[in-house]
Amino acid sequence: MRILALLLLLIFSVSKNYAQKPINSTITKADLIKFIEQAKEEGKVNEDLIIVLDEQRFVGIDSIKADEKFFAEIRIIKKGNKEMNQIYGDKAENGIIMIQSPPRTPEERK
């Protein structure tokens, strides 16, 4: 019982740094804008945040086409996370929106 309580506490502690949409949701540019605005209102990210698509490139909202859709999971890495500076630079302290597409083939899912 004690181990279960510790495990739940650990999961809650880790999960409060992230917010997610289900992996099999389709996200439009409008959904992404709404998601970011909500994260700003909740104080999770600042105005000058970073958006990372599939851990490979930084994107700006303006570079996303109005009709573009993502079949992906969205995570927020909250502002102030200094560990992310090593990967994404000082701007990462403003918060990061991670858009991760699921693997496309069975081999990629492993």
Image (cartoon, rainbow, N blue to C red):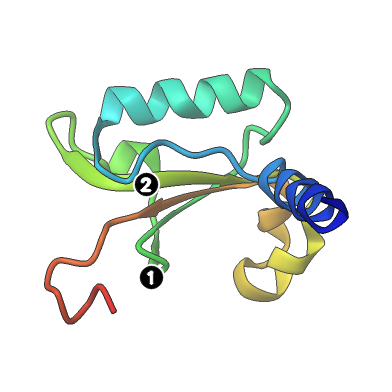
Point out the residue furthest to the front here: 1
Q: In which quarter of the image is residue 46?
A: top right
Task: Report whether 25 appears left or right of 17.
Answer: left
Q: Which numbered marker is on residue 56?
A: 1
Who's the residue at 67% across and 55% down the image? 91
Observer-nearest residue: 8 or 101?
8
Give percent across and percent down for residue 39: 60, 27
Q: Which residue is drawn at 87% across and 53% down?
A: 2
Dividing the picture into quadrants, the one containing residue 27 is: top left
Quarter of the image where the C terminus is located: bottom left
Name which quarter of the figure residue 69 lies in: top left
Q: Name the residue under label 2.
A: 73
The extreme right residue here reads: 2
In front here: 50 or 109?
109
The relative height of residue 95 versus residue 27 in the rendered view (above or below) is below
> In this image, 35 relative to 78: left or right?
left
Q: Which of 23 and 43 is in front in this view?
A: 23
* Amino acid at dot 1: Gln
C-alpha distance separating marks 2 and 1: 15 Å
Callout 1: 10 Å neighbours few (<14), some, many (20+)?
few
Q: Where is residue 17 in the image (x, y as percent from the top left)?
A: 70, 45
Q: Which residue is drawn at 42% across and 44% down?
A: 74
Q: Nearer the viewer's eye, disc 2 or disc 1?
A: 2
Q: What residue type is labelled 2?
A: Glu
**SS class, disc 1:** loop
Precedes in sequence: disc 2 or disc 1: 1
Within 10 angstroms of label 2, few (less than 14), some, or many (20 or more) residues? Answer: many
From the viewer's perspective, tell me whether residue 103 is left or right of residue 2.
left
Q: Camera-side residue: 99 or 103?
A: 103
Taking the spot 73% from the left edge, 26% from the top edge, the residue there is 43
